[in-house]
């Protein structure tokens, strides 16, 4: 049995969702039934696939395609994101090796990930709060662009100013505490490289 949940809905559309799931897990433990919780990867490890099937591209969005995210109303977001992502990955290896640049790199990565959230294109396409989504998208892109530019410049004065800016931004958006080890792995290194 698989029970997938759109966890984005927990708390505002399905406020009792986390409580419901907690009760299910407590009941499973109490009754010791044959059903046991497992992650998807754990199940696949325990039960290797014998057959493969190819799924067609599609989405839960309108028309079952990707037009909610990549359409006429949102093309401009991708025209800004794609070059930003390229500049980020160009700057990341040297920044990761420079302890003075790591705080800036970490916040640049956070801002890039926040800009890449598919929510912005979805909200813009629905028109529900397009001005809000546009503003948030532009704020995260601008912050990432500013920090990446400082990483590329790499001078002491640029990095000093960028560290101050990264600190200000982190007070607002300080998610993904392990982002530097994750970047190290993404670049072919080890998690321990940036942990000392």
Image (cartoon, rainbow, N blue to C red):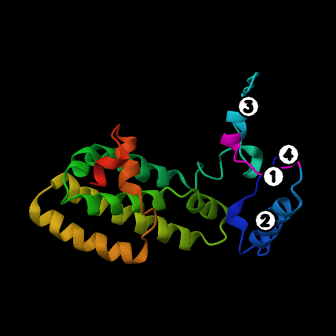
Q: Could you tell whether 19 is left or right of 189 in the image?
A: right
Secondary structure category for the residue under label 2:
helix
Mark 4 crowdedness (10 Å alpha carbons): few <14, some 14-19, many ≥20: few
Mark 3 crowdedness (10 Å alpha carbons): few <14, some 14-19, many ≥20: few
| Label 4–label 1 contact, CB within 8 A | yes
Figure quadrant of the N terminus: top right
| Label 4–label 2 contact, CB within 8 A | no
- What stretch of residues is rendered in magenta? 34-42
Res 115 label: none
**Which residue appears at 47% of the width and 62% of the height?**
114
Q: Could you tell whether 23 is left or right of 66 in the image?
A: right
What main secondary structure does the magenta stretch of the protein show? loop
Q: CA distance from mark 4 to mark 2?
A: 15 Å
Mark 3 / mark 4, whichever is N-terminal? 4
| Label 3–label 2 contact, CB within 8 A | no
Mark 2 crowdedness (10 Å alpha carbons): few <14, some 14-19, many ≥20: few
Q: Position of residue 149 (x, y in %)?
A: 24, 57
**Residue found at the far left of this picture:** 156
Q: Mark 4 — residue? A: 1
Q: Give the foreground label among 1 and 3.
A: 1
Mark 1 crowdedness (10 Å alpha carbons): few <14, some 14-19, many ≥20: few
Q: Give the foreground label among 3 and 4.
A: 4
Q: Position of residue 107 (x, y in %)?
A: 35, 63
Q: CA distance from mark 3 to mark 4?
A: 20 Å
Q: Nearer the viewer, residue 40 or 65?
A: 40
Q: Mark 3 — residue? A: 55
Mark 1 / mark 2, whichever is N-terminal? 1
Q: Nearer the viewer, residue 81 or 144?
A: 144
Q: Mark 1 — residue? A: 3
Q: Mark 2 — residue? A: 21
| Label 1–label 3 contact, CB within 8 A | no
């Amino acid at each position: 049995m698989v029970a997938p949940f759109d966890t984005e809905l927990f708390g505002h559309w399905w406020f009792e969702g986390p409580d419901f799931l907690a009760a299910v897990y407590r009941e499973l433990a109490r009754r010791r039934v044959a059903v046991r919780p497992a992650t998807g990867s754990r199940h696949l490890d325990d039960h290797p696939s014998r057959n493969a099937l190819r799924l067609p591209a599609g989405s839960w969005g309108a028309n079952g395609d990707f037009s909610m995210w990549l359409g006429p109303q949102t093309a401009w977001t991708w025209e800004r994101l794609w070059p930003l992502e390229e500049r980020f990955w160009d700057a990341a290896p040297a920044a990761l090796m420079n302890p003075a640049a790591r705080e800036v790199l970490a916040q640049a990565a956070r801002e890039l990930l926040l800009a890449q959230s598919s929510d912005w294109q979805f909200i813009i396409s629905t028109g529900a709060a397009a001005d809000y989504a546009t503003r948030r998208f532009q704020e995260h892109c601008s912050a990432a662009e500013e920090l990446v530019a400082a990483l590329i410049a790499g001078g002491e004065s640029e990095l000093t100013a960028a560290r101050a800016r990264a600190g200000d931004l982190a007070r607002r958006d300080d998610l993904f505490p392990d982002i530097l080890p994750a970047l190290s792995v993404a670049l072919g290194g080890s998690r321990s490289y940036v942990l000392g």
